[in-house]
């Protein structure tokens, strides 16, 4: 469906955060955040509890006032504008539906507040219910709906008045895994159809990777890295990002030199090559990183030709459905994790001596 077919053509708002700060007493919840969010983009603020992501979202919405910095929507500062005049849609984790109002009344509430007449309200409510695939639920009350249905109603209410910017604060956090994954697809569909700007907050890395055009990884009130999901996963710039987005193995080493675009490091007596980054000098300490699914068991010499290789001992093997997760003790005492499809080969038993191989191009410096 082309963008705008349901609620009419609506261009997404461009949002600019410049040096945004928020302090509570002496605690800096948000520290100097600057972001340019493009019109029609799906941007996710991802981070652990206390990273500042929700506080940043609440400042965009107008529910928190910045201590310093500016927030502009389409080039106009909104810091001094109250929330109800920013024309922003908002979806919360707890749905925030009025229990005494029907589905139709909940969705129509923003329109009623804006003085839209009853006939037009009914028409737009019907369109919004069709958009979230809840046609026929107009007369029900929130208590008569499942959690997923209530969140769909909350989405419809947030979008019925055609905002150009939609903010979502952990909207799927209260749902079970299967329903959460289903609604992730639905939210992506709505974004593609409507073309408005989505700013989404979550602590769930898989959710962020699945849904976002770009992700701003936040830590201790600042943006640790900003980029497309693939870039953040494949080229994290720090140990924090590498460990927060997905799972990573870390190998501390000493630089021995560089060759053919790779840095060569001694990791507890094992030579490991990684993609060259910066200008490392011989003798520098480095931290190398490789994802568990990039490691594999090397059974014969040809399996490891031209690759990084390390001896290890299996300490545990965990069956996790489609994958088996191995905990290993690498030579030199380095702990490693290897993931492989569970049906790929016979499972290695704890105590087994193995060799692990992986491509130098899958190894990065963090």
Image (cartoon, helix red, strand yellow):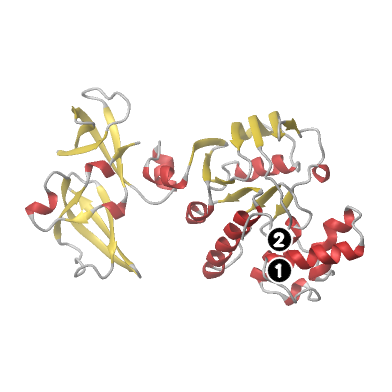
* Residue 291 x, y percent position in the rendering: 32, 49
191 w.r.t. 103: above or below = above
23 w.r.t. 243: above or below = above
Q: Nearer the viewer, residue 290 or 76?
A: 76
Q: Earlier in the sequence, mark 2 or mark 1?
A: 2
Please rate how many residues cluster around mark 1, counting C-alpha atoms within 10 Å: few if below 14, some from 14 to 19, many from 20.
some
**Separation of marks 2 and 1 at Cα, in angstroms:** 8 Å
Residue visible at 46% across and 47% down?
229
* Residue 253 x, y percent position in the rendering: 24, 34
Residue visible at 51% across and 56% down?
207
- How many numbered badges does the structure rendering display? 2
Q: Nearer the viewer, residue 106 or 353?
A: 106
Quadrant holding the C terminus: top left
213 with respect to 322 (left or right): right
* Residue 153 x, y percent position in the rendering: 72, 65
Quadrant holding the N terminus: bottom right
Q: Secondary structure at mark 2?
A: loop
* Residue 353 x, y percent position in the rendering: 13, 58
The residue that disc 2 covers is 6
Q: Secondary structure at mark 1?
A: helix
Residue 138 appears in which quarter of the rendering?
bottom right
Q: Nearer the viewer, residue 153 or 347?
A: 153
63 with respect to 211 (left or right): right
Q: Nearer the viewer, residue 136 or 59?
A: 136
197 w.r.t. 69: above or below = below
The reply to whether the C-beta atoms of the residues labelled 2 and 1 are less than 8 Å apart is: yes
Residue 130 is labelled as: 1
287 w.r.t. 92: above or below = above
Residue 90 is labelled as: none
* Mark 2 vs mark 1: in front: 2
Please rate how many residues cluster around mark 2, counting C-alpha atoms within 10 Å: few if below 14, some from 14 to 19, many from 20.
some
């Amino acid at each position: 469906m082309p963008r705008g077919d349901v609620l009419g053509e609506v261009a997404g708002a461009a949002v600019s955060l410049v040096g945004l700060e928020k302090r509570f007493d002496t605690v800096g919840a948000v520290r100097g955040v600057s972001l340019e969010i493009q019109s029609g983009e799906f941007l996710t603020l991802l981070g652990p509890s206390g990273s500042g992501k929700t506080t940043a979202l609440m400042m965009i919405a107008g529910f928190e006032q910045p201590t310093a910095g500016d927030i502009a929507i389409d080039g106009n500062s909104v810091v001094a504008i109250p929330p109800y005049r920013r024309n922003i849609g908002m979806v919360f984790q707890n749905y925030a539906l009025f229990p005494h109002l029907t589905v139709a009344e909940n969705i129509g509430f923003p329109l009623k507040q804006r003085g839209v007449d009853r006939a037009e309200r009914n028409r737009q409510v019907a369109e919004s219910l069709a958009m979230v695939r809840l046609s026929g639920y107009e007369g029900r009350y929130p208590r008569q709906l499942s959690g997923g249905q209530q969140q769909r109603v909350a989405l419809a209410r947030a979008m019925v008045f055609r905002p150009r910017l939609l903010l979502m604060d952990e909207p799927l956090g209260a749902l079970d895994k299967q329903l959460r994954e289903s609604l992730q697809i639905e939210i992506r569909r709505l974004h593609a159809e409507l073309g408005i700007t989505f700013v989404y907050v979550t602590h769930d890395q898989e959710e962020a990777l699945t849904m976002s055009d770009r992700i701003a990884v936040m830590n201790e009130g600042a943006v640790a890295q900003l980029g497309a999901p693939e870039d953040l996963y494949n080229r994290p710039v720090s140990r924090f990002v590498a460990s927060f987005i997905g799972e990573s193995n870390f190998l501390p080493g000493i630089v021995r030199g560089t060759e053919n675009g790779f840095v060569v490091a001694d990791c507890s007596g094992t030579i490991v090559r990684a993609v060259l980054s910066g200008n490392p000098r011989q003798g520098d300490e480095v931290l190398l990183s490789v994802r568990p699914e990039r490691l594999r068991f090397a059974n014969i010499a040809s399996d490891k030709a031209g690759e990084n290789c390390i001896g290890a001992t299996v300490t545990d093997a965990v069956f996790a459905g489609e994958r088996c997760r191995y905990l290993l003790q690498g030579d030199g005492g380095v702990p490693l994790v290897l993931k492989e499809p569970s049906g790929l080969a016979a499972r290695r038993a704890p105590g087994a001596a193995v060799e692990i191989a992986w491509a130098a191009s899958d190894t990065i410096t963090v």
